[in-house]
Amino acid sequence: MDRTRLLAGITATRAQPDDVLYLERHGEDYSWCFLEPDAVPAAVARQPAGPAPDAWMFYSGPWPIDRAAELPGFVDELLAEMESMCGGADRCRWPLDQPYPRGH
């Protein structure tokens, strides 16, 4: 599914505080699901011959309270974070061996 359908699907689903989101990208196509406890995510369960995702992530934090207003931006932030982990735009991370906060 494309990014628009991804956002619509996640928005339509009423995530609960203990839900774990699994999100992956293959080129321009995305797929996602909420994992059941002890479930094996798609990236792990994939057949060896199947293509691995270009990027993937899990999310298990709080969801926006006002879903209609906040969720689109929230999902964009999740996608930007996922992309930053595979060569996307720098999300301004601090090296572990340097003290926090770090000035720019």
Image: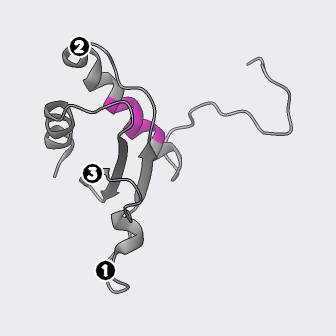
Mark-to-mark CA distance, 1 and 3: 17 Å
x and y percentages locating residue 36 in the rendered image: 32, 53
Check disc 1 and give the amino acid type: Gly
Q: Residue at x 36, y 51 (%)?
A: 22
Q: Are marks 1 and 3 in contact (CB under 8 Å)?
A: no
On residue 35, which mark appears?
A: none
Q: Residue at x 32, y 23 (%)?
A: 73
Check disc 2 and give the amino acid type: Ala
Using residue 49 as the reference point, say whether residue 81 is left or right of it.
Answer: right
**Which of the 4 image quarters holds residue 45?**
bottom left
Indicate yes or no whether the magenta region holds residue 78.
yes
Which residues, given as a range, are shown in magenta?
A: 75-81
> Which of disc 3 and disc 2 is earlier in sequence?
3
x and y percentages locating residue 63 in the rendered image: 36, 25
Q: Dot 3, crowdedness within 10 Å: few (<14), some or many (≥20)?
A: some
| Prevailing secondary structure of the magenta residues | helix
Q: Which residue is mark 2?
A: 69
> Which of disc 2 and disc 1 is earlier in sequence?
1
Mark 1 or 3, which is nearer the eye?
3
Q: Nearer the viewer, residue 24 or 13?
A: 13
x and y percentages locating residue 67 in the rendered image: 24, 19
Q: Residue at x 34, y 20 (%)?
A: 64
Q: Nearer the viewer, residue 17 or 102?
A: 17
Using residue 100 as the reference point, say whether residue 8 is left or right of it.
Answer: left
Which quadrant would the C terminus be assigned to in this image? top right
> Which of disc 3 and disc 1 is earlier in sequence?
3
Disc 2, SS: helix
Q: Which residue is mark 1?
A: 50
Q: Residue at x 51, y 43 (%)?
A: 84
Q: Which residue is mark 3?
A: 32
